Image (tube, rainbow, N blue to C red):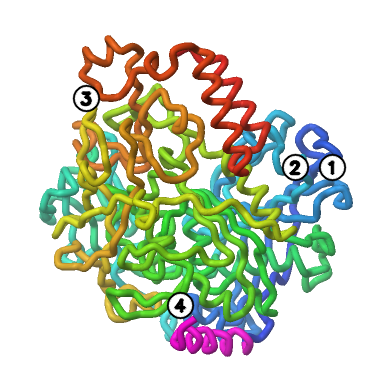
């Protein structure tokens, strides 16, 4: 550890240890109890579960150093005791008899208000699973976990049982509205949308204070739409003129305007901190209402998919894994599909629903240093920071699994999680491991559908590995059993293919030869990849206040990123190679390109591709496909099943698959017609 790092951590420690213990959940209100839920279904020895729904009311001391870093909290209205108040939805699934549970809490960080319990439990039922069938396989319930959710995202819509949070609007000292620049990246993959809702109200309807541009491809130069080509329908809506004119399908519109009344959105971090701390450590709230989990929780975990995984990254970076009594909040974190990004939550005029991909939501404050966990010096700015800095100072660091699909490497610069800002490999921190699910897209695609993309989607499902890794994370936290080694592309292992920035372009390129990509008939390869630039949001950006949004990336320096190299079939070499990649019948990728009527060869966002092998050698030669056909790889169906079985056995031995999930792969192979 360098002298600079020691000084940095000691300064943080002095801040952490002087925090007054005032932030808390002051009241918990359970508004409904369904006991038992899931039609009375029992889960192994644990028995039945019950569902609790309600509200939690919290208060924050804006003068506390751990809360003062919340942007604009000093400008929020106060209670009579000088606190800043918020209220959020809460949802708990717990064993009816807690003594039969495993005394462990899994906090699922909701995605835009929605629950994603299906990833572990293969459940259905959306945001309010109720029936026995909707409980799915009950992966977590059979093991006795208590599950909890809380609202944290101020942009989550209050519909369909979404979890929401109500946070205050920041005001000037005289009570007047705060105004400032805001930015909207607008693109509709339809030809029928005629209006666009703004994230914040316009401070003025004077069109000269706003700019609307359009381009058909990301690489085109934006064209300004004159004032007679658009208007404010009201202070939160814009539309094209004449009224009723649809936005051009898949065109990129960008709107810069003066907004007013920002939400104190960063309170969402403190809300999660204080909710988990309450469930873990409190007996009652301030008015005597009991904590439904009082004296039960011994270990806490979180699971997050996509947007909330980026939230969990910033939750750690900002030090919210220490409550205001300096106790650890989460013991273990499993992040899935978060990339190396944070979330645009702790900023004035925050828009946490945004996320950047190859052709989506550029120029927002998502890809901001620090990206990696260790304390490092940014080669572009000279700043020193790391995701572990604050938790190291408070001795509250969790064990963390950062798990990503191939898509996060191609469209969210995930390699920055485990490299420095110049792309050099970093050793794993003592408490963090990194895993790539090779050849997977952002989630599980439909291999019979192209959607708006050129090729069929990628059906590689990472959830079986997520379950096995969660068991490994639990063992690491509760038993000290070392987890499987990280599995990601590394320059030192020659499995990394470097991305090359394109001057003036918002994206980069991975040259075909660098990747090792084969030329496949009917498949376009451009090497399009997301590149992280050092963007200029103005001199107050370090305080969470954006005084200007960048209009582009011209002359902006970039960070070094890479993806996994591929084998001669185009399948990725690095990462956890699940049976669809290790024993392939297709080339699967984490990247995809759009069809001509949806943006041409621009990136197809979170989608990947499934490009089937030819069935026979004759078919392959006729198609001029360089990849071996299915028949050449697997002379008999039994040979294919045997190869899948061997792959499964290896993955189970490495603890990347549970035996029961391995059996599913084998049964599917036996049922598949080649």
Q: Can residue 486 be spotted in the picture?
A: yes
Q: Which residue is mark 4?
A: 72
Looking at the rendered image, the quarter that the C terminus falls into is top left
- Gap in angstroms between the C-alphas marked 4 and 3: 53 Å
Q: Are marks 1 and 3 in contact (CB under 8 Å)?
A: no
Of the two numbered discs 2 and 3 in the rendering, the one whose residue sits closer to the viewer: 3
Residue drawn at (55%, 46%), measured in percent from left and top?
Answer: 114
Q: Are marks 2 and 3 in contact (CB under 8 Å)?
A: no
Q: Which residue is mark 1?
A: 46
Q: Which residue is mark 2?
A: 141
Front-most of residues 395 and 538: 395
Front-most of residues 167 and 329: 329
Of the two numbered discs 4 and 3 in the rendering, the one whose residue sits closer to the viewer: 3
Q: Secondary structure at mark 2?
A: helix
Q: Residues within 10 Å of mark 2 (few under 14, many from 20)?
A: many
Q: Position of residue 162 (x, y in %)?
A: 57, 48
- Gap in angstroms between the C-alphas marked 4 and 1: 45 Å
| Magenta span of residues | 1-18
- Gap in angstroms between the C-alphas marked 1 and 2: 8 Å
Q: Position of residue 559 (x, y in %)?
A: 28, 64
| Up/down of 646 relative to 379, above or below | above
Q: Residues within 10 Å of mark 1 (few under 14, many from 20)?
A: many
Front-most of residues 390 and 213: 390
- Gap in angstroms between the C-alphas marked 1 and 3: 53 Å
Residue 9 in the figure: left or right of residue 474: left
Q: Main secondary structure of the magenta part?
A: helix
Q: Which residue is mark 3?
A: 522
Q: Are marks 1 and 2 in contact (CB under 8 Å)?
A: yes
Q: Secondary structure at mark 3?
A: loop
- Gap in angstroms between the C-alphas marked 4 and 2: 40 Å
Q: Can residue 244 be spotted in the picture?
A: no
Q: Secondary structure at mark 1?
A: loop
């Amino acid at each position: 550890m360098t002298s600079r790092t020691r000084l940095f951590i000691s300064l943080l420690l002095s801040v952490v240890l002087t925090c007054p213990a005032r932030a808390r959940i002051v009241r918990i209100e359970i508004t409904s109890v369904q006991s038992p839920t899931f039609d009375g279904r029992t889960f192994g020895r644990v028995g039945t579960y019950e569902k609790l729904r309600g509200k939690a009311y919290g208060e924050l001391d804006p003068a506390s150093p751990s809360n003062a870093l919340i942007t604009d909290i000093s400008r929020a209205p106060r209670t009579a005791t000088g606190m800043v108040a918020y209220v959020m939805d809460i949802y708990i699934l717990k064993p009816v008899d807690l003594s039969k549970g495993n005394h462990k809490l899994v906090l699922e960080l909701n995605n835009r208000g929605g629950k994603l319990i299906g990833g572990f439990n293969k459940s259905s039922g959306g945001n309010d699973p109720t029936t026995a069938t909707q409980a799915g396989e009950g992966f977590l319930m059979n093991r006795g976990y208590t599950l909890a959710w809380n609202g944290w995202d101020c942009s989550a819509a209050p519909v369909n049982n979404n979890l929401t949070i109500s946070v205050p609007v920041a005001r000037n000292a005289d009570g007047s509205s705060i105004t400032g620049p805001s930015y909207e990246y607008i693109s509709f993959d339809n030809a029928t949308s005629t209006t666009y809702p703004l994230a914040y109200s316009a401070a003025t309807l004077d069109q000269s204070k706003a700019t609307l541009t359009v381009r058909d491809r990301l690489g085109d130069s934006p064209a300004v739409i004159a004032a007679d080509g658009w208007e404010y329908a009201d202070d939160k809506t814009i539309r094209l003129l004449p009224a009723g004119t649809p936005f051009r399908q898949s065109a990129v519109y960008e709107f810069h305007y003066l907004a007013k009344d920002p939400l104190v959105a960063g309170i969402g971090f403190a809300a999660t901190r204080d909710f988990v701390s309450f469930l873990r450590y409190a007996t009652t709230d301030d008015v005597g209402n009991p904590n439904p989990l009082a004296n039960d929780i011994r270990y806490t975990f979180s699971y997050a998919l996509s947007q909330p995984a980026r939230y969990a990254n910033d939750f750690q970076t900002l030090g919210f894994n220490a409550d205001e009594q300096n106790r650890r909040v989460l013991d273990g974190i499993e992040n899935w599909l978060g990339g190396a990004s944070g979330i645009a939550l702790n900023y004035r005029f925050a828009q946490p629903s945004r996320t950047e991909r190859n052709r989506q939501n550029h120029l927002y404050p998502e890809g901001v240093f620090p990206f990696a966990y260790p304390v490092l010096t940014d080669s572009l700015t000279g700043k020193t920071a790391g995701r572990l800095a604050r938790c190291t100072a408070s001795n509250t660091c969790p064990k963390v699994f950062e798990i990503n699909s191939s898509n996060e490497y191609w469209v969210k610069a995930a390699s920055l999680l485990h490299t420095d800002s110049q792309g050099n490999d970093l050793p794993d921190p003592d408490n963090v491991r990194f895993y790539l699910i090779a050849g997977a897209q952002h989630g599980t695609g439909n291999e019979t559908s192209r959607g708006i993309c050129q090729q069929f989607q990628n059906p590689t499902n990472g959830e079986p590995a997520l379950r096995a890794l969660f068991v490994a994370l639990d063992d690491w936290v509760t038993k000290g059993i070392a987890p499987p080694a990280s599995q990601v592309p590394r320059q030192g292992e020659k499995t990394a293919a470097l991305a090359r920035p394109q001057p003036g372009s918002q994206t980069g390129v991975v040259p075909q030869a660098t990747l090792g990509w084969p030329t496949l008939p009917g498949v376009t390869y451009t090497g399009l990849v997301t590149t992280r630039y050092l963007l200029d949001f103005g001199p107050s950006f370090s305080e969470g206040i954006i005084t200007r949004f960048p209009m582009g990336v011209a002359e902006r320096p970039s960070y070094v990123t890479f993806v996994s190299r591929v084998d001669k079939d185009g399948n990725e070499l690095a990462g956890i190679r699940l049976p669809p990649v290790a024993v392939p019948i297709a080339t699967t990728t984490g990247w995809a390109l759009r069809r001509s009527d949806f943006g041409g060869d621009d990136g197809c966002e979170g989608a990947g591709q499934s490009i089937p092998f030819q069935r026979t050698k004759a078919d392959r030669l006729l198609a001029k496909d360089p990849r071996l056909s299915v028949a050449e790889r697997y002379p008999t169906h039994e040979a294919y099943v045997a190869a899948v079985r061997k792959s499964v056995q290896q993955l189970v031995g490495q603890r990347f698959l549970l035996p029961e999930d391995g059996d599913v792969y084998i049964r599917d192979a036996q049922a598949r017609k080649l």
